[in-house]
Image: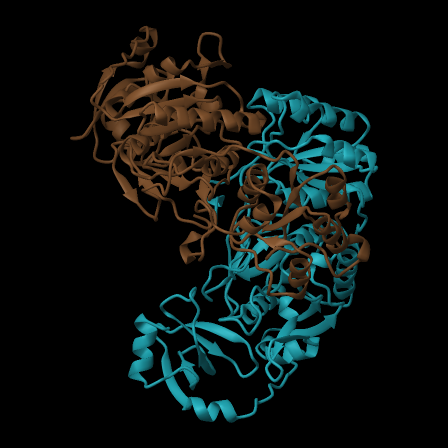
Chain colours: A cyan, B brown
Amino acid sequence: MYSGIVKRLMDDNDLKIGDYVRFKSNKFEIEGKIIQNSEFTKENIIILKYENGYNLGLDVTGLMVEKIKRADEAETESEAKAEISINKDLPKISIIYTGGTIGSKVDYRTGGVYMLLKPEELLSSVPELSNIADIKPRQLFSVASEDMTFHEWRAIAKAITEEINNGSRGIVITIGTDTMHYISAALSFMVQNLNVPVVLTGSQRSSDRGSSDAFMNLICSAQIAAKSNVNEVGICMHKSSSDDACIFIRGTKARKMNTSRRDAFRPINDLPIAEVKMDGEINYTNDYINKPSGKLELKDGFEEKVALIKVFPNSDPDIINYYVKKGYKGIIIEGTGLGHTPVSGDPEKSYLKNIKSAVDSGVIIGMTSQCIYGRVNSKVYTNLRLLSEAGVIYCEDMTPETAYVKLAWLLGNYSSEDAKRLLNQNMVGEIRNRTLYDEFLI
Amino acid sequence: MYSGIVKRLMDDNDLKIGDYVRFKSNKFEIEGKIIQNSEFTKENIIILKYENGYNLGLDVTGLMVEKIKRADEAETESEAKAEISINKDLPKISIIYTGGTIGSKVDYRTGGVYMLLKPEELLSSVPELSNIADIKPRQLFSVASEDMTFHEWRAIAKAITEEINNGSRGIVITIGTDTMHYISAALSFMVQNLNVPVVLTGSQRSSDRGSSDAFMNLICSAQIAAKSNVNEVGICMHKSSSDDACIFIRGTKARKMNTSRRDAFRPINDLPIAEVKMDGEINYTNDYINKPSGKLELKDGFEEKVALIKVFPNSDPDIINYYVKKGYKGIIIEGTGLGHTPVSGDPEKSYLKNIKSAVDSGVIIGMTSQCIYGRVNSKVYTNLRLLSEAGVIYCEDMTPETAYVKLAWLLGNYSSEDAKRLLNQNMVGEIRNRTLYDEFLI
C-alpha cells in the first residue's frame, strides 16, 4: 500500500490503483497505469506500468499528475504499439542479446509463461532507445547465464569485435545476471585494446514483478555506449533500489551481491567508473581507460582445467589432489581472512603438503579471500608465509571470481611460466595498488 | 600525518608525535603517547599508545588535553605496571582465550616477534575490564582460527557450559577472526537453551599496527557479557572503522567481509542485535532471545563428511560424484543468483544428473547463494525448479557458511531424515522469515 507523499498525491487527485495517468515535470512526461508498490518501494516512489509491459518506479517529488483514464476503462483498451523510429544521425551502437531475464516477458493472456522477446520486440518496447542512438539489435543466442561456458563467452567476444569492425561506437550486451560478473571479467581480458565502451546489462526482476529494472538498465547502458569514452568492459545496473541512477562498474571489479535486489551489482575494492541517469547525464567517479594502447585484438583462449575451491573449517585437503590427478593446470583457492588455509593444526587437515606437491608438479595455485572485500597478504602471519613459501601466488585485491577467470584465460593464451608471472600483476584494471577507505560495502 | 581538527589541537598545545598526554572529558580521562595515524584514520581521531602497548583511536572533539611529558623523556622511562583489582560485587563473567591475533603482542625489545599473551597478562593490560565485571580468565588453548576443526569447536562449547555451571552470567571468548563466523554459528547450534550471553571477539590488527582494535573489542564484549540479557551466541567487533562503538551480531548471521578492516564483521540478512559502547551503553537494534525455552544442553555431534562447494562457470559437475564416492553425507552448494547450478546448457557441464543420483543415494544437498546477501528461491526460473525437483533443499537466507555448519551439526545429532527436514527450518535465528530493506551491505 502507498503511504506518505504518494498517498497524499493520490488522494488529492482522486487516483486509484489501475488508473492510467500522465506525470509531468518541465523535463519529461511519462504515462502509465498505477500499479501496487512492493515492500521494497520507497515512500516517494509510485510504480507505473507502461503500455509495453515494463514498470517504472517514479519519484513523485515535484511532479504534476493528470488522470487520463479510470481503472475500468484502461483495463479494456487494447495495447497501443510503440513505433521504432531510426535516426541515422545519432551515434551507432549495437545491442547484443544473449538471453536472461531481460529477454523474457510474461504472456498476459496465458499468465506466468515466459517467452523469449525478439530483439526487435525488446527494442520496440523501449522506444526511448531510438532517441539515444542509431541502434543495431543482434540476437546471438538465448542461454541463461548460469548455463554459459567458455564457448558462449568466446561467441560474445567475437561478436563484440565484429560489431566494432562494422562501425559501432559502443556495444550493449544483455545477459543473465547470475554469472554476469564472471563474463564481464572474461571479456575484459579477451578483447584486448578495446576502443569503444562495452556495457553488460540485464534485469533482476521480470516485468511481472513490482517494478522491473530492465527498462532503466537498458536506457542507461545505451547512454554509456553512445556517449562515453570509457574504453573498457563494464556492468551497468541500478545504483540503488530506487530508479534514480545506474552505476557503471569495471568488469573485473564487479560482483552480484544480492540474490534479488535491483542494486545487486556492486563494485568490489573499487569505485564505480561512472553514475549515469536515463537522461544521459554521466558523472565519472573513477579513473578509466579512454585510449587503447594498441590495436584491437581477440585473445580468446581458455584452459578448461582450472578450478575454484572454497576452503572451510574441517575440510579435507584431498580436494587439491583430486584436481591434480584430473590434470588440472590451475587452482584458485578462496581462503579465509588474509588468504589462509588450515596449515599448522591437525596434520590431516593441513593443506600445506598437498599444495606443495601440486605446485611442484607445475600446477599454478592462486590465493584469494572469501571475505570478498580487502586484499590478501602473504606476510602478516606465519601460516601465510608457509603457504607463500610453498609457491602459492597471492592475488592481491582480486575477487575469487575474477582470479578464476584470469587464471583460466592466462593458461589458455600464455605459457605456464608467463601465466604464473602475470597472475598477480595488473593487466586491465583487475588489481588496484591501493584500497580506498570508501570502497567497502558500497 | 594528522590534519584538520587534530592538527590544530596539536599545534595549539605544542604537541608532537611521541609526547605523553592526558585527554579529559567530564566522563573520562585517558593517558597515552601520541603516535602516528594511518591512512584509514579519520580526521577527528588521534591515536594514543597506552603504556601497556595497546593503541586507541580517540575522537578529540570536545576533549581537553594536557601534556605530561615531552617525547624524549617519555621514551626513556620504564613502563608502569597496571594493577588488576578484583571487585567481587560486580557481575561474574568468564573470558576464555583460544588464540588468534588478540592473544598476541609485539615484543618491543626484539622487534616484530609475536609472543603469546597469558590470560593474566591480557587482563592486566586492559585494567578497565576489572571495573566492568568480576572476571575469571581461562586459557583453553592457542590455535589460529583457520586451523581449528570440530575438535576445538567442541572444546569451546564444553568450556562454555562449564563456565555457566560455575556461575558465570556471561562468557567472552577471544578467538582468531578468520573462521569466527563459522564458529559462532557452530556454538549457536551446539549449546542449546543458552541462558547467558556468549560473546565472541578478536582483533583485526595486532598492537603494533596504526591502531589495534583489541582493547575496545574486549571492553565492549565484556559489557555485553556482564550487562545484557541476550541469551544467544554473537560476535562483538567494531561497528565502523573509528572507535565509536561495537556491534553485537547474531552468531548465525555474521560474516567476515573484509580481510583487514576493523569493521570487517557484518550482519548478513539481519540487523545487529545491539550496539555497545565502551562505557557500557547498550542500544538494542533487533529482537533476541532473552529466555531459554528449556534446560541448558550440549549437543556437540558433527558429521565429518559434509562439504561446501562453490559452483562456477565451466566447472566440472564430477565434483559431486567425488564427494559421494568418498562417502559424504551432505553437501552445501554455493550456487549463483537465486540458487543455480548449470542445468540446461552443455550436458557435460550440467550438475542435474549428478545431483539427482547423489540425492537418490541419500546425500543431503542444500543450496545457498554466492551472492551472500538475499535469499535463495526454488520457484522463479525453470532451472531452479529442476534442481528443487531433483531434491535440492533451498536454504532460505542462510549464508553458505552457516548452512555448512548447520548441516554438519544436524547430521551429527539427528537422523538423516530429521536433518533433511530441519535444514531449511529456523532453529536458533539462522533463518529469518523476511529480509528487511535495510539489511543489505551494512
- Left or right: residue B215 compared with residue B113: left
| Residue A121: x %, y % from top left | 66, 79
Question: In terms of image quadrants, where is residue B95?
Answer: top left
- The number of callouts visible is 0
User: Compared to A279, does B107 lie above or below?
Assistant: above
Q: Is residue B210 visible?
A: no
Identify which residue, B80 or A433, lies in the foreground: B80
What residue is drawn where x is 47% and y is 42%? B252
- Left or right: residue B335 compared with residue A17: right
Identify which residue, B26 or B249, lies in the foreground: B249
User: Compared to B102, does A161 lie above or below?
Assistant: below
What residue is drawn where x is 68% and y is 31%? A316
Question: In terms of image quadrants, where is residue A396?
Answer: top right
User: Compared to B37, does B252 lie above or below?
Assistant: below
| Residue B286: x %, y % from top left | 34, 48
| Residue B81: x %, y % from top left | 30, 9
Classify the position of the N terminus of chain A by image quarter: bottom left
Identify which residue, A274 or B111, lies in the foreground: B111
Q: Is residue B250 visible?
A: yes
| Residue A381: x %, y % from top left | 56, 22
Question: In terms of image quadrants, where is residue A327?
Answer: top right
- Left or right: residue A209 compared with residue A222: left
- Left or right: residue A363 compared with residue B103: right
What residue is drawn where x is 80% and y is 37%? A329
